[in-house]
Amino acid sequence: MVHPSNVGLLDKSKMRRTCAIIVLGVLMLCWLGRLHGAIDAGLERRIIVGGKIFTHLLSGDERLLQQARKAGTFHVWLVYKSQPEMAEKASSILSAKPANAAPGMAISTLTLDALGNKEPSDTVEYSGIFIAEPLSPDELQQIIQFANTNHVLLFSPFEGDVEAGAATGFIVEVKVQPFLNRKALQQAGINLRPLYLKVSKLHD
């Protein structure tokens, strides 16, 4: 039995604990929010840099360039898994055609699952695939196989993907350079001109 004189003290103590828990929860949410924002900002920067490099690499393969000239534009897939906002960011970057660039770019945004359901007849005009969000190793292998089968240039702006088998990406060392996987390029039937190889870092 709690003495009546102690009831107020117990209520105050309980309230203090409750307030402390609420404050801790709010601080945790704020911390997680800042962390999430920092991660998103890093991914966004990689998409911005990658989008510009991808645009130039497409013109480095004579077959893809002639295909695009015939069609009037490069047809590319922009692939995401579950973050359409990242795909929208990438689409806006790829749509910004440089003043001296020709031809332009027609972008089809779709999920990884939708890409896997494409029939061979759906892929004839397409030149490349831009990965808009980080994928798991199995998901990356799925898209690599698709690119190889359909002879399109696969580009990932995310660290580790070129080493894992993506044909192209970029690397930041002393400077930012295109990063090319020789074996993956060969498997996809992509033959970049010597100048593009000279200014890129190569992964064998």
Image: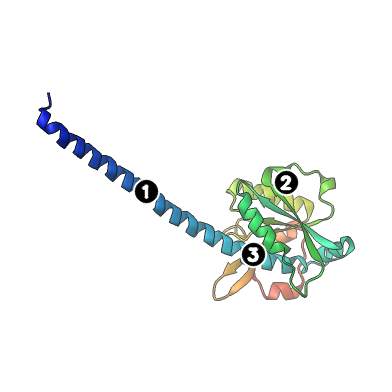
In the picture provided, is 59 more to the left or to the right than 72? left
User: Which dot marks residue 50?
Assistant: 3
Q: Mark 2 points at which residue?
A: 115
The CA span between labels 1 and 3 is 36 Å
The amino acid beneath tag 2 is Leu
| 1 vs 3, front mark | 1
- Decide which of tag 2 and tag 1 comes sooner along the chain: 1
- Decide which of tag 1 and tag 3 comes sooner along the chain: 1
**Helix, strand or loop under label 3:** helix
Dot 2 alpha-carbon crowd within 10 angstroms: few under 14, some 14 to 19, many 20 or more: some
- 117 versus 73 height, above or below: above
Quarter of the image with the N terminus in it: top left
Looking at this view, is 170 or 5 the one in front?
5
Residue found at the far right of this picture: 70
User: Dots 1 and 3: beta carbons under 8 Å?
Assistant: no
Measuring from the top left, give residue 190's x and y in whole percent.
77, 62
The CA span between labels 2 and 1 is 40 Å
The amino acid beneath tag 3 is Gly
Q: Mark 1 points at which residue?
A: 26
The answer to whether residue 66 is seen in the rendering is yes
Measuring from the top left, give residue 153's x and y in whole percent.
74, 59
The amino acid beneath tag 1 is Val
User: Dots 2 and 1: beta carbons under 8 Å?
Assistant: no
